[in-house]
Image (tube, helix red, strand yellow):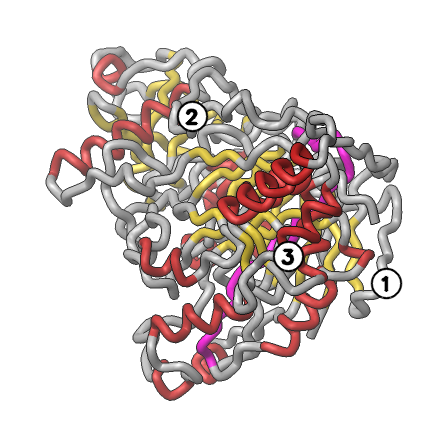
Amino acid sequence: MPLETPVRVARELARRGYNAEREAVTLLANASDPAAALDAAVETADDDALRLTAAHVRSTLDATTDADTDAGSPDEPATTTPTDPAASTTDGSAIATTDDPSTTTDEPNSSVSTAGHDPTHTDSDATSPVETEGCETATRTTTEPTPDPSEDPGSPPPVTVTGDITGRSTGTGEYADFVSVFRDRYETLSAKLRGRVNHRPASAIEDMTGGNDVAMIGLVDDVRSSANGHWIVELEDTTGTVSCMITKGRDLAGVVDEILLDECLAVEGTLSDDAGLVFVDTLHFPDVPRTHRPNTADRHVQAALVSDVHVGSQEFMADAWNRFADWLHTEEAEAVEYLLLAGDMVEGVGVYPDQDEELDIVDIYDQYERFSEHLKAVPGDLEIVMIPGNHDAVRLAEPQPAFDQELRDMMSAHDARVVGNPSTVTVEGVSVLMYHGVSLDEVIAELPEEKASYDEPHRAMYQLLKKRHVAPTYGGRNRLAPEEEDYLVVDEVPDVFHTGHVHKLGYGKYHDVLAVNSGCWQAQTAFQKSVNIDPDAGFAPIVDLDTLDLTVRKFA
């Protein structure tokens, strides 16, 4: 086949049993005769080499050029012929599940849903006093440097990452760190609400007389019910605390059970006669604006969303993983160019009681070595991005930095991009918020089952999008680390929200954001059985980046 693109070069190398550094693939693709250059690089590689380096390819190309010059061949500039695959013309949000990896059952115009999910459901009615449209007025700059403009303009845009804590952690556990992280949370999220309410600080409200209309933005300090069945929400800003009452007869009472401690809210209402309470008329979450329109790729390209591999567990489903890896080598998977791994690469050690009795590999480093071997089974041309999870060998407190260099070296075969948890990864212009998902346990425990459950984990993800924070409650079940900035705020609205952790498959769209919890690759353990977790294992959600349609493939 012609080798005019890096992707095809990488596939041909993989067919011959070689992986290659990304720069080496680019050099071969840009050669005047890519096929001949690839043949020469393979022929001159060491017999025991499995990975071609950029240095080796350069030396091969230099030797070929010198030989051509000696023979009197004129120099010719290297050329790259870009391809323009036809983009999908599927309308709507087609999502299908197939047990057979050799078949696809995409159905145009079908709604994004799971069993039991009402695709017509919205979290608030247009006439409801609960306002959920966001007001984007502030952004933060935690982005990587601008890509090098010297890169080949015909190649796909590079993967970029924002919101990664790696190398930026400054928290020491001092009191000032806690003040800093909450102040940053308040300032960032309140900025998204200030365009919708005439905010007055708590100190100013305290000086007002009864009967006045007031509006305030604050973090939730407490939620409790009164003796009469009303709800009291204590809101705190940088100047003080205000008590807000939501009476049981109002429509707002239906959303009080969604409120979590420490999240940011805005309320509007009237001061009581004694000015001791605000009677709430409307309540606003930061939320995803209903005007949000997601970005899409300008060509047909796909990403596989995977999490919770758990290599090292006796229940790791190696056969299912191998079937997935084999499928990625088929022509049917040719459009899959990205593999996004949302944490828990290995089972870890000492994560839960009596875990040692369920381990197939008892040494954490041996677990990562084995994971690396399984990762090598996927095509060498895939762009791989991975974040850690609570079973991985990084700190438990979120935000979690990426794996250390020793572990990265173990997983270097595919030149994977290793970033922190959470991180927003932009591929082909589509932003994917990758978060392992430990806070989903807390959301599911605190909210009513119809709004968040393990059977429909995407609904719990909707709540995190509504709150614009991946772990709102501080000091709850989820370990959180104080930093100068709150890296867990969802500052920019993502196009795709990808989580794992709960080992359940769930997907849907919330205000046009595709939310996917990708299941796992581990059968039910004795511990999971004891806590009633029945995992969805061996699934690989595949998202079309040009349409944000989703196909779920089953390999177990």
Residue farthest to the left, as pictured: 174
Which of these two is toward me, 155 or 383? 155
Q: Specify whether residue 300 is painted magenta.
A: yes
Q: Specify whether residue 234 is painted magenta.
A: no
The residue under label 3 is 42
Location of residue 364 (image quadrant): bottom left
Q: Secondary structure at mark 1?
A: loop
Is residue 160 left or right of 112 when viewed as pictured?
left
Amino acid type, mark 1: Thr
Q: Which mark is residue 145?
A: 2
The residue under label 1 is 103
Quarter of the image where the C terminus is located: bottom right
Is residue 489 left or right of 486 when viewed as pictured?
right
In this rendering, the answer to whether 450 lies above or below 186 is below
Foreground disc of the pair 3, 2: 3
Contact (CB < 8 A) between labels 1 and 3?
no
Span shown in magenta: 295-313
In the rendered image, residue 504, in percent from the top left (x then y), is placed at 58, 64
Is residue 400 left or right of 467 when viewed as pictured?
left
In the rendered image, residue 505, in percent from the top left (x then y), is placed at 63, 61
Location of residue 75 (image quadrant): top right
Q: Secondary structure at mark 2?
A: loop
In the rendered image, residue 15, in percent from the top left (x then y), is placed at 72, 61
Taken as a whole, is the magenta stretch helix, strand or loop?
loop
Q: CA distance from mark 3 to mark 2?
A: 35 Å
Q: Residue at x 59, y 42 (%)?
A: 63
Q: Residue at x 50, y 58 (%)?
A: 413
Q: Residue at x 38, y 65 (%)?
A: 391
